[in-house]
Structures are given as structure tokens and as C-alpha cells.
Amino acid sequence: MNANHLINMVVRLVMRRVIGKGINAGIDAVGKRGKRAKGNQDGDDDGGHGPDTGQTTKRAKQSMRMTRRMGRF
């Protein structure tokens, strides 16, 4: 192995981890934003659990699966 190959390999490993953490942070931020927007509108303190919480969870899981598939390439 030459130095160029080693450098590329290390850069790819680091970039995968950084991008994965950034995507996870973005998904978490979107989830928190949705809870803030829905939470405590009518005086009830349900923590923002609206009727579409299942859809949000489903979309988050789907996006995580897609990012894992992209990471394989």
C-alpha cells in the first residue's frame, strides 16, 4: 500500500463518521423542533405528542435505513 491509498482510507473513515453524526444531529434537531411547535398549545402538558408522532418516527427510521445503505457504497 502506498501513502496515497492509506490517506484516502483514513479520510473516508473519518468523513463517514462525521457525516453520520451530522445526519443524526439533524434528525434529532428536527424531532425536537416538532415537539416544541406542538407542545403546550392548549394548556395541556403532553410533551408534544401529537397524532402524527407515529409518522414522524416512521420517517426517522426510514431515513436512518437509507443513510446506512448509502454508507455501504
Image (spheres, rainbow, N blue to C red):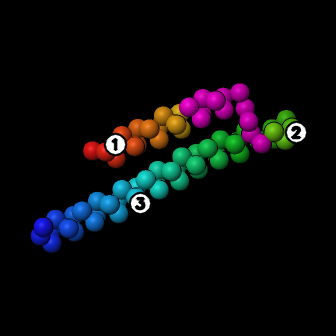
**Which residue occupies the foreground of this view, 41 or 12?**
12
The tally of labels here is 3
Q: What's the CA distance linking mark 1 and mark 3?
A: 14 Å
Of the residues under marks 1 and 3, which one precedes in the sequence?
3
Secondary element at tag 1 = helix
Q: Are marks 1 and 3 in contact (CB under 8 Å)?
A: no
Q: Position of residue 25 (x, y in %)?
A: 53, 53
* Residue beneath the point at 74% across and 39% down: 48
Disc 3 marks which residue? 18
Location of residue 26 with respect to 65 vertically, above or below: below
Tag of residue 43: 2
Residue 53 magenta-drawn?
A: yes
**Mark drawn on residue 10:** none
Crowd tier of the residue under label 2, counting other residues whose Cα lies within 10 Å: few below 14, some 14–19, many 20 or above: few
* Mark toward the start of the polypeptide (2 vs 1): 2
Quarter-wise, where is residue 16 in the image? Answer: bottom left
Residue found at the far left of this picture = 2
Q: Picture coordinates of residue 42 (x, y %)?
A: 85, 35
Given the image, on which type of amino acid does mark 1 rest?
A: Met
48 on left or right of 31:
right
- Amino acid marked by disc 2: Gly
Image quadrant in which you'd find residue 13? bottom left
Residue 3 percent across, percent down from the top left: 15, 72
Q: Quadrant of the N terminus?
A: bottom left
Residue 33 sits above or below residue 59 on the image: below
Find the magenta span and give its range: 47-58
Horizontal side of residue 3 vs 35, given as left or right: left
Which amino acid, by three-letter code, is at mark 3? Val
Front position among marks 2 and 1: 1
Picture disc at residue 70: 1
Q: Nearer the viewer, residue 1 or 37?
A: 1
